[in-house]
Image (cartoon, rainbow, N blue to C red):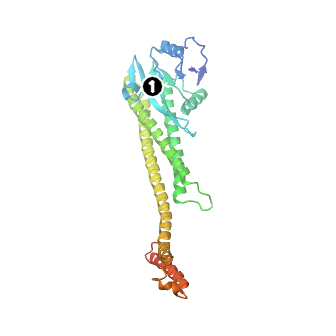
Amino acid sequence: MLSVYVPNGTSLERVAVEPGAPLPDSAIWVDLISPTVPEDKTVEDLLGVAIPTREEMQEIEVSSRLYVENGGRYMTATLMCQSDTASPKTTPVTFILAKHRLVTVRYDEPRPFVIIEHKLARSCPAGIKGEQVLMDLLDAIIDRTADILERIGAEVDQISHTIFEPDEDVEQPPYDDILKALGRKGDLTSKVRESQVSIARLLLFLSNEAENMRWAKDTRAQLKTMVRDVGSLSDHATYISNKVTFLLDALLGIVSIQQNDIIKIFSIAAVVFMPPTLVASIYGMNFHKNMIELEWDYGYPFALVLMVLAAVVPYLIFKWKKWI
């Protein structure tokens, strides 16, 4: 799908382009979503730059993601997508700056694009260019990442409360559900960190190119602020990742302790009932000639008392040793 945005007074208006028709010269932002070959050709004719394929966008080498070609700056970053669903994922997005126009190539729907589209449709500076649209998009991406990390942090804190300070009046979820929840938070955090690393590289590349493109001083200062913000968010993502790891270890330790308690009960029961079983086995041999207790009038009560003592004495010893 091809979306073209042109300035219209104090707003950025989305205009329809017929298939095969040339793009308007006033277009400053061209958004390609799962583009077709004819759509790629249309944009290439307007800007004189090649549109990368999906396979090229998925390459992880820095030289394949951040480069200058034919006067255009190519920048590919990994962005979060569907982070509010049960199946969050990352998707590569390419930003191309050429002739003061911005081209974005993507194969999914990251939320910052919708946010910026609505924002610029309501109000945008006069004489807006592709560089300013790019800055707004990057700012929205960083804000969105911060929101995701805040939500993950709050949910991890709730899981921590469930593990260490469970509410007595609330039925606690099974431990396997808690483990799955922690695993999902850890996976989401790792995806956020992957996105932050790619955005940080993009910002550093853009900061170096800003000198060559002779950007305004305040725009370059904004880039430096974004670099600091991404660095702090990366540190926060590392903190959350470490906390998730700690909670996983703690939960596995609690499960192990509870399992040991159960095994200890069975072990004590086996040790307590072993001596009475031995006594009963001995007197169950029925060797009348050599076992004079069998002829006693009180032989049977004697055997019962002996079995009870054999069970009680080990139990008292365990209590005295504080093993139970």
Q: Nearer the viewer, residue 113 or 100?
A: 113
Q: Is residue 14 visible?
A: yes
Q: Is residue 129 visible?
A: no
Q: Residue pushed farthest bottom?
A: 297
**Type of the residue with mark 1:** Met
Give the vertical position of 318 relative to 132 (above or below). Answer: below
Residue drawn 52% across the image and 80% down it: 308
Specify few, some or many for label 1: CA neighbours under 10 Å numbering under 14, 14-19, or 20 or more. many
Give the vertical position of 75 relative to 293 (above or below). Answer: above
Q: Position of residue 176 (x, y in %)?
A: 54, 51
Give the vertical position of 252 relative to 85 (above or below). Answer: below
The answer to which quarter of the image holds residue 60 is top left
Give the vertical position of 138 relative to 160 (above or below). Answer: above
Residue drawn 43% across the image and 31% down it: 218
Residue drawn 50% across the image and 46% down it: 183
As helix, strand or loop, the secondary structure at mark 1 comes to: helix
Q: Position of residue 185 (x, y in %)?
A: 51, 45
Residue drawn 62% across the image and 58% down it: 171
Q: Residue pushed farthest front?
A: 289
Q: Mark 1 sits on what residue?
A: 57
